[in-house]
Amino acid sequence: MNKDEELLVALRKVIRAIDLRSKQLNKDVGLTGPQLLVMQNVGKDPGIMARQVAENITLSPATVTSILDRLEIKQLVHRVRSTEDKRKVGLFLTEKGQDILQDAPLPFQEHFTNRFTQLEEWEQSQMVATMQRIAKMMDAQNIDASPLLEVGNLADKVEVDIAPTTDKTKK
Amino acid sequence: MNKDEELLVALRKVIRAIDLRSKQLNKDVGLTGPQLLVMQNVGKDPGIMARQVAENITLSPATVTSILDRLEIKQLVHRVRSTEDKRKVGLFLTEKGQDILQDAPLPFQEHFTNRFTQLEEWEQSQMVATMQRIAKMMDAQNIDASPLLEVGNLADKVEVDIAPTTDKTKK
DNA sequence: GTAAAATAGTTTCAGCACGAATTAATATTC
DNA sequence: GAATATTAATTCGTGCTGAAACTATTTTAC
């Protein structure tokens, strides 16, 4: 088997592990991984816009909308339309949501996190760097789509600008 | 941000990239990534059982069934119930399926694969090892959860030696 | 002021993904 | 041979996912 195939097989296993963990979470505490991620974002930054949450956790707005629907049905999150700009929707945890978030487990496997934090510092760094590099290499397709960029040294030049903090103040 | 959080953010990006690629594939050639993976498996090993395919690509049997449904509707794959053991279903590509598989692009980003194969040998190995290690660390929860099954050589399952770590001699 | 563009969010639609329950067939045990 | 267990595949229900189309609103351009 080629190395790239091996890599992708390993990747599939990781993806599956995350999905399974999410489903187990749902059984245990009634929240899936993505739902927990959204709630953490809202809890950390009350009033945050849906768009911002989507960017933070690397999901499309449509997906976040559907997740918010479920969270609102469960009475864990509250949507409040802004009065000054009625396009915007601020997000807040309900009391019940805050309580649940308090003693909710980690969104991604606590087992994994525990193990990971036990590694040597340099090993952690190395793993992070590798993952980020893979992410960057995969993202490259999007950049290819726009012919404007000059590609000299790919590994160094490819930059993905995902979430610029809102500087919509002036435009 | 903690290192483990950074790692998981990068992971989310990779997962998203794979999903986006799959959807783009579907638009381009009418086949998603998982569909293509199934077809490759069937093409490589005609008559293969559904169960085996599921294992090969790390998916549950239920998922493979639904994928096969779509492939059969598109007339790309043919299901043939075994006569000797009628529980079993053998899978075969139709002629149309073979044609399409021939000039189908790579299931995972060709951009990525190209870039990856251009890396130095040691870098590839290192990336593969890291991914496998992450996969293993995440998988550990399953093993922890069912201590009943493991009788003697748990050590073999849990602590299989990962490829010689990092070739730091070349940094 | 009005037309055009941009923005935030939603809806719709199709596919992926899995566990649990189910069906059908085969294997095992007594 | 009949009861029991196992196996292969499917069905069902639910959630995640994003593109595309849509609504409503705000901003920009003329």
Image (cartoon, coloured by chain):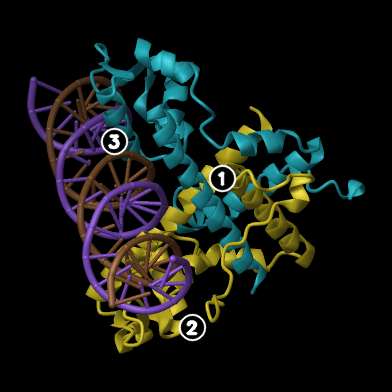
Chain colours: A yellow, B cyan, C brown, D purple
Q: Which residue, given by chain and number where applicable, does mark 2 sit on?
A: A44
User: Is there any visible trace of residue A103 in the rendered image?
Assistant: no
Q: Which residue, given by chain and number where applicable, does mark 1 sit on?
A: A11
Chain that bears disc 2: A
Q: Quadrant of residue A131?
A: bottom right
| SS under mark 1 | helix
| Left or right placement of residue D4 versus residue A79 in this view | left
The kind of residue on which mark 1 rests is Leu
Compared with B131, C5 (above or below) is below
> Residue at 81% of width from left, 40% of height from top?
B122
| SS under mark 2 | helix
CB of mark 3 within 8 Å of CB of mark 2? no
In the image, which disc is placed on residue B84?
none
Badge 2, how many Cα within 10 Å: few under 14, some, many 20+?
Answer: few
CB of mark 1 within 8 Å of CB of mark 2? no
Badge 3, how many Cα within 10 Å: few under 14, some, many 20+?
Answer: few
x then y, percent, for residue B111 = 62, 37
Q: Quadrant of residue A161?
A: bottom right
| Left or right placement of residue B83 versus residue B106 in this view | left
- Give the distance between the C-alpha atoms of the residues marked 3 and 2, in whole angstroms: 39 Å
| SS under mark 3 | helix
x then y, percent, for residue A67 = 33, 66
The kind of residue on which mark 2 rests is Lys
Quadrant location, the N terminus of chain B: bottom right
x then y, percent, for residue B48 = 40, 19
Q: Which residue, given by chain and number where applicable, does mark 3 sit on?
A: B66
- Give the distance between the C-alpha atoms of the residues marked 1 and 2, in whole angstroms: 30 Å
